[in-house]
Image: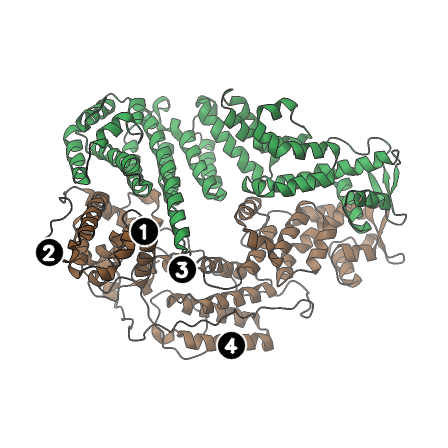
Chain colours: A brown, B green
Amino acid sequence: MSAPPWSRSKFDKPSFGTVNVSKSIKTSATVPKTSNTSSFTPSSSSSSSTSATAAETTSSSRGNGGAAAAAGSNAWPPSLKEYVGRCFTAFPPSQRPMMEVNLKKIISAALDSGAIWTIDWDKQPLPIEPESNDDDMEDRLEALRGNRDKDTAMSDAPLTTEQTTKRKATKRSAKWDQPPSDDYSPPPPSPTIKKKKIDLSTRFVMSEEDKAKKESRARRFHSDSHENTATPTPPPPSFGADQLYISDGVPEVFVGRCQKLEKRYLRLTSAPDPETVRPLPVLKQALELLKQKWREEKNYAYICDQFKSMRQDLTVQLIQNEFTVNVYEIHARIALERGDLGEYNQCQTQLRALYEKGIPGHPEEFLAYRILYFLHTRNQSDMNELLTELTEKEKENEAVMHALAVRTALTDSDYHTLMKLYMNAPNMGGYVMDSFIDRERLLALEIICKAFRPEIGLDYLTVELGFESEEECLEFMQRNSIIEHFDSKTRRLRTKEAYPVVMYNRMAAFKKIDIKGQL
Amino acid sequence: MTMSLEAYLAKLNRAVKTRSGHDLALLVSKDNKDLLSAVRNFSSFSAASDISTVAHSTVKNKDWAAIASGSCLVAYLYEIERDPVLAYREQNTLTQLFNRVVEKNDNWILPVLYTITQQLRHIAVEADTILQNQSNSQNSSTEKQERKLEEAARTINRSLTVCLNDRNSPLESSRKQGIYFVLSVLFKVYFKLGVLSLAKSALRVLNSSSAAGDVPPLETYPKAHVVTFRYYVGILAFVEEDYEKAEEHLSAALNLCHRKSIRNQQRILLYLIPTHLLLRRQFPQAGVWTQFPDLARLYQPLFAAVRRGDLRAYESHLAAREATLIKRRLYLTLLKTRSAIVRPRFFEMVYRAKDRNSRMPVATFREGLHAIGIDVDDEQVECWCAVMIYQGQMKGYISREKGIVVLSNTDPFPKRR
């Protein structure tokens, strides 16, 4: 596995110092006491500093009281900004806390006395004497610690399979194309920045910038167990991780030039070629086309493949907005409709991350699916954790309340309540429940066979096992080899005889299932 | 009594030379009075680079010099500057460095490791609280920052690995003696972060090592280590609804727990009491409630309702405590208790009120429920009865044609499953 190619440097050789400046300032921006030092950002530290850094920096200085508020970066002479940049480059990280404390004092003194514009910052001595020790080696080692994040986001799930459930399309309103409340608006990034073609000879040489990125990634993901490995291990192209560190380092924004609406999904093994990547406006048209095609043709293999390539185009261009959320939500709903839980789960993992960034969508709807999904995988401890995190607002949501009621019914083995909830699931909840309803039907039937004697009527079974017709119920009994105990004249099941067979089938159905739910 | 930096460093150096783990642990603790007195003399941090210089001249070993100056810096930032966020950063760097020092030593160093990892946890929690308040007041919830405690967890996990991987020293002086303490610190962090899956995987790592015979038997560890460890393993089993295992570990923890550490006993009982109820229908004795008033406030009304079979009261007490119970991961178990114990008791009371008639109309149960404000249809009552029969809390069968529940003549509501 090579490092994600689209993260390669587009700048030839920025100086190490430059990179360090933006990195250090970024670090200090997270530290409250020094956050007035953090308000000097970008201009001096080269064009490579990111908008994300700038935004974060200003936001962190906002809450910091008068001094910091007054010291917005505009109020500072450029020479001071350069001075601060020098300070950060002159010291290894181990010495920075002390340096920052002093720097803070120097600058606040200058601010207080009003001397900020009169001091010749170019000649100002550094806050402490730089000390040479072997900490730099430490830093470099740290930079080399790789990120071993597992590639979970993009596993090769089979695209589709035959649908397992016999749900009629009319039974539940499939709301997969629910549009988000507002359309996205941010303009596409300037197309003047073009991705350089990378020739093979340079691909394996780490640029200084890459090192810096590695360092920032190492801080975030640094894995203790590989501390002493000196060989750099490039991380596998895990999308989540890349998005994280790119948005936090230097953005590698490029805009594709592909104008075709349809595109087959191909797993990337090298740098994405802008000629084959569709820009946002084209993707938006493509989504409309896909929605129409799904409505008309219902070809899941095709649709799933198209959505995967669309997600890939969004990812490589770092597009994360309401449109992105919309794409993932629609794909997740379509996957649910076809019972493809593996694909659904990939979408919902990304959706959670997008919602956490505050991008609008339908978080409660998908929270409800997640609860139901935990019930499918019977993950008790994750369910406990999820419960501890629920907010009051979420608990008042209809879909979330429904999912929680399903949970309680399952705990109680209360099949009567469960089947009522199954019949009245909001949104696409019924499709998630499809994944475990047969299992629960077997348990319900086992309970019924144990408790009701000597017989039980087909009418009761049909309703209490959540079937829409007696035929479906009979077919279920057929599948579970108890039809021979069904008296077709009285239309009753002889419970005592059926019980051992049902118990056997139920035990088989409750064996541990694959948690990913891949088809 | 004030102490100069040089005197402090000399003291520390002596402790290192004589391998006095306990003395050293005290010296690197951020609230140690010698340490504080030594750093209190720093008027400004221009002196900070001096610490390092002085430390390196007093403490000859390069690593220990760095640890000494790191400890000074943490104490200064935490106690004098009162800045847990900066102090956290230093403490984390210090712990990472210390992990490498531990690798070169045997079990004498463990007390120091305990102090340093616990201190890292404490400062990380404080730093997170401050950062959390700041981001709340700024209302900038756009992107979630990684919590300091998450980073600290990785550092402490490394400390655990360093203990587990002692392949050189003989067992009596092995760093493996530190396993359970450090693992408990790590459990605390994971529970605080709400990532029980990580706690479980840490436990798996330990279990595979001990299955390979690489870990000394649990009995050879100090009781304090064992109590904390079994407490957390008990809770992990509890949230997985493996109540037998939970009972085993929690009971063991309670038995080993120091008689006077009331708070720890209370923590254990918080989970052990509902476990006993669900598993064995055991109620705590009255003395427990008087000794642990907090537990009494939480549980006593619920348990009284269970005794009376008062389904309605149980539900309302449960609802009133929902938030607390969810936070402690107790809610799902108490919900289970409702259907497994309270509901059968209520049905039993209706049965007794009807002169122990063994042929109980479903409608009678429905009316009984209606009387306490629970309105449901006959199918719901049948379903509840069916589940109770299935689970063995009620003996008999349901005749749907006649609309009655036929109860066993002997012991129709068995007390034990």
Query: Which amino acid type is marked by label 4?
Result: Glu
Label 2, on which residue? A120
Classify mark 2: helix, strand or loop: loop
Q: Residue at x 48, y 72 (%)?
A: A183
Label 4, on which residue? A288
Query: Which amino acid type is marked by label 1?
Result: Gly
Query: Which amino acid type is marked by label 3?
Result: Phe
Label 3, on which residue? A239
Answer whether residue B237 is visible to the viewer in this image. Answer: yes
* Alpha carbons under labels 3 and 4: distance apart: 25 Å
Label 1, on which residue? A65
Q: Position of residue B307 (x, y in %)?
A: 72, 31
Residue at the limit of the structure toward the front, as seen here: A113
The answer for which chain carries disc 3 is A
Q: Position of residue B392 (x, y in %)?
A: 75, 37
Query: Which amino acid type is marked by label 2?
Result: Asp
Depth order, front residue of B130/A414: B130
Residue B118 left/right relative to A122? right
Look at discs 1 and 3 and give the one toward the viewer.
Answer: 1
* Alpha carbons under labels 1 and 4: distance apart: 48 Å
Q: Residue at x 40, y 40 (%)?
A: B125
* Alpha carbons under labels 2 and 3: distance apart: 47 Å
The answer for which chain carries disc 2 is A
Identify the mark nearer the N-term, 2 or 4. 2
